[in-house]
Image (cartoon, rainbow, N blue to C red):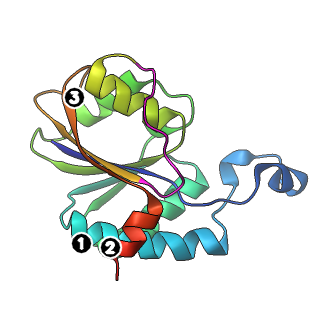
Amino acid sequence: MKLLIVRHAIAEDRALFALKNSDDDKRPLTHKGRKRMRQSAKGLSKTHPELEYLISSPLTRAVQTANILSEYYPYAARKETKHLAPGAPPEAAADFLASLPADANVALVGHEPDLSELIAWLCTGSPFGFIYFKKGAACLLDIVGKPGPSRAEIEWFLAPRQLRELAV
């Protein structure tokens, strides 16, 4: 399985949004976040042109990021899962991934620190993150066999600026 992991784009400030709405799950992307994510998605599609599944956390900012990615991956099946919501353990995401074909090309859109913990767990068996994801960053993993601890290798990790530069 090829697993593309993407952190959601720049969202509204948490504290300012809380003044208007107490439900952080509904916090949307900013105009700048949407604009930058479109540029990053274009670069990402040049680096990783095929996706069969595009799966996101159910939170608004992750769904909006996945929707932008779907503009560049129109044939990818879109799904949302609670297994990518903040606080979900890496095992939950792995169980969800195991329900997909073993040779699938999958993208996950989620949140920090959960994505870093998922990558660490898939690569080393330990959930202690060793990667810091900026908003809009992406990482490609190659998973051999059933998704689980120590079953993945990192193929590449790109910061948002690098993805935007690839779009040119």
Residue 58 rendering spot, x and y as whole percentages: 52, 48
Residue underneath mark 2: 166
Image position of 167 (left or right of 109): left
Q: Please identify the quadrant where the C terminus is shown.
A: bottom left
Question: As shown in the figure, which amino acid type bears the numbered disc 2?
Answer: Leu
Describe the element under mark 2 as helix, strand or loop: helix
Seen in the picture, residue 77 relative to 97 is either above or below; the reply is: below
Residue 44 lies in magenta, yes or no?
A: no
Residue 24 rendering spot, x and y as whole percentages: 72, 46
Magenta extent: 127-137
Contact between marks 2 and 1 (CB within 8 A): the answer is yes
Seen in the picture, residue 23 relative to 16 is either above or below; the reply is: above
Between marks 2 and 1, how big is the CA–CA gap? 7 Å
User: Residue pushed farthest right?
Assistant: 19
Residue at point 19% right, 25% down? 151
Residue underneath mark 3: 147
Q: Quadrant of residue 93?
A: top left
- Judge by depth and name the residue closer to the eye, 166 or 20: 166
Residue 27 rendering spot, x and y as whole percentages: 69, 55
Q: Residues within 10 Å of mark 1 (few under 14, many from 20)?
A: some
Q: Please identify the quadrant where the N terminus is shown.
A: top left
Residue at point 45% right, 27% down? 129
- Precedes in sequence: disc 2 or disc 1: 1
Q: Residues within 10 Å of mark 3 (few under 14, many from 20)?
A: many
Image position of 93 (left or right of 35): left
Question: As shown in the figure, which amino acid type bears the numbered disc 3?
Answer: Pro
Q: Which mark is in front, 2 or 3?
A: 2
- Residue 42 in sight in this render: no
Residue underneath mark 1: 46
Residue at point 34% right, 78% down? 167
Image position of 56 (left or right of 60): left
Question: As shown in the figure, which amino acid type bears the numbered disc 1?
Answer: Lys
